[in-house]
Amino acid sequence: MRLDARPIAQSAGPAQFVQILADPVGSPYLRRPFSFLRVDRDAGWFEIYYDVIGPGTRRLQEARPGDAFNALGPLGRVFDPPEGHLLLVAGGVGIVPLAFLAWDHPERRLSTTLLMGANTATRLPDLDALLPADLVRHVSTDDGTTGHAGFVTDLIEQHATPTTAVLTCGPHAMMARVAQITAELSLSCYASLENHMACGFGACVGCVVEYRESDREDERYRRVCLDGPVVDAHGIVW
Amino acid sequence: MDMTVDIGGGLRLRNPVLMASGTFGHGAEYQGLFDFAHIGGVVTKTITRHPRAGNPPPRTAETPSGMLNSIGLTNPGLEGFIAEKLPQLSDLPTARIVSIAGTSSEEFAEMAEALCEHGGFDAIELNISSPNMKDGGMLFGCREDSARDVTRAVKDVADLPVIVKLTPNVTDIVAIANAVEEGGADGVALINTLLGMAIDIESARPILGNVTGGLSGPAVKPVALALTWKVASAVGIPVVGMGGISNATDAIEFMIAGANAIQVGTATFVDPLAGPNTVDGIIDYCQRKEIVRVAQLTGSIALP
């Protein structure tokens, strides 16, 4: 879904998100957060990609060309990828912020590898439509209907170098496993977290994640919207 | 047009719109959002004596026309607030109200005294109504004697106006309002959230990590309006109304029901400009109705 919104498109960076009010009369009441898939800063548009899972996304799905939505963003912190080889590990719509990183850093694509997992081939999104053509990708399916048969996390070790940095986004269990494997391999690992949010700009303190270490009690849980959405995957409690 | 209102203890607001506690951080974080001189004031997220982590996630759940929260008063504690938050709060060009919660009357009083000695703000809101604080919060606001005692304990030491925020989760909120008035409250604010719950039927688990939480948003507005009307009809001190106020129409309803001022809360999560937009809408209404003083709206209900 493409939305014309010049101020948002011009300032959006990788890992950031936009809060969209799916229904102007308040049903659903709260905005819904979406990662950017692609932006065109000159043309002034951004694209989002989502699974239809509830009344908010259903409302968006019903949109027709020319419809207007109230959008707030960009929100969250921009993720600047570290130097060296980057391994992106995606599950489901978790591919979206990782794809944006690849779109937004063409100079990094030769040193980036994407691993994409799904339950079965029919649940895989159209990767050719979502990803830059020159981004190397490997696919896995739990049932072996396409690509590697098994979990996408099985592929990490063979595609990592000793200096690889991993960035993951997807289902909680998958990201937790990525964090565990990268810890065992002594690789740095970042996770782009998704969470239910009320505001998206830090006021409600609802979208928190627990950190392993904090200097003070009130910093034990930190906001995904403000401190993230990308966090050190080894620093949080999975 | 005179937009000023009095909310007790000599505190006069530029206009009747306050940003509600727990929905606007400690104020200063959102300075770039709009001109703070345009709103009546801000109420900070509640401060406790010691830093609090808050409750385990998930902390929010959307419900029809509203949301549940079980944030659990995440805050840096009294010393952290004074050192890190109060200096920026003090600089805001609007009324600054600090919300506090304690685990005993003594702790409430100790916090109020320390804050008043420090200064740099205009009033205290006593949160005796949070459904998300097991060791205090709503416990004080559910009984007349404890509500009266904690109010009195704070009033004995505070040299700034004290507004007591009431919970709707009681049999008779008017009795509690009368009790805090007896305790010396300069004003009352109502309502805090309604105790609520949601369950995921696939897993049979509560959606909130803390099992129950507080319901807010448009869903609670009719309840809040009725309670505001009942309390305003019964007490002799100013009333700050809140509960599901999203726009000027909502705000004006509360004022007609008897509120001297109102707070915009959950609506800010959906529209960060809900507060200032509410101010604009009230001004438009007063102009259209040729009302010269917004305070004339308070209690102007035309009962059948």
Image (tube, coloured by chain):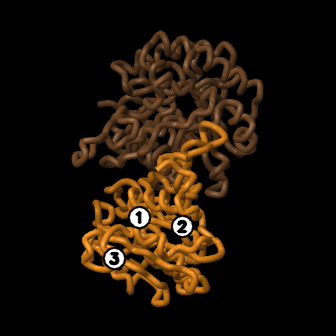
Chain colours: A orange, B brown
Q: Residue B64, can we see it?
A: yes
- The residue lying at 39 percent from left, 74 percent from top is A116
Q: How crowded is mark 2: few (under 14 residues within 10 Å), some or many (20 or more)?
A: many
Position of B213 compared to A75: left or right? left
Q: Dot 3 corresponds to which residue?
A: A148
For label 2, the SS is: loop
- The residue lying at 41 percent from left, 64 percent from top is A170
Q: Where is residue B205 in the image (x, y as percent from the top left)?
A: 29, 41
Classify the position of the C terminus of chain B by image quarter.
top left
Residue A170, label in figure: 1
CA–CA distance in space, label 3 to label 1: 18 Å
Position of B69 compared to B303: left or right? right
Q: Nearer the viewer, residue A50 or A94?
A: A94
Residue B15 higher or lower than B234, as above or below: below
Subunit under mark 2: A
Task: Mark 3 or mark 2: name the one nearer the start of the chain.
Answer: 2
Q: Dot 2 corresponds to which residue?
A: A16
Q: How crowded is mark 3: few (under 14 residues within 10 Å), some or many (20 or more)?
A: some
Subunit under mark 1: A
Q: Are marks 2 and 1 in contact (CB under 8 Å)?
A: no
Q: Are marks 3 and 1 on the same chain?
A: yes
CA–CA distance in space, label 3 to label 2: 30 Å
- The residue lying at 56 percent from left, 26 percent from top is B101
Q: Nearer the viewer, residue B294 or B271?
A: B271
Residue A77 higher or lower than A210, as above or below: below
Amino acid of disc 3:
His
Q: Nearer the viewer, residue A86 or A105?
A: A86
- The residue lying at 27 percent from left, 75 percent from top is A144
Amino acid of disc 1:
Gly
Q: Residue B279, can we see it?
A: no
CA–CA distance in space, label 2 to label 1: 15 Å
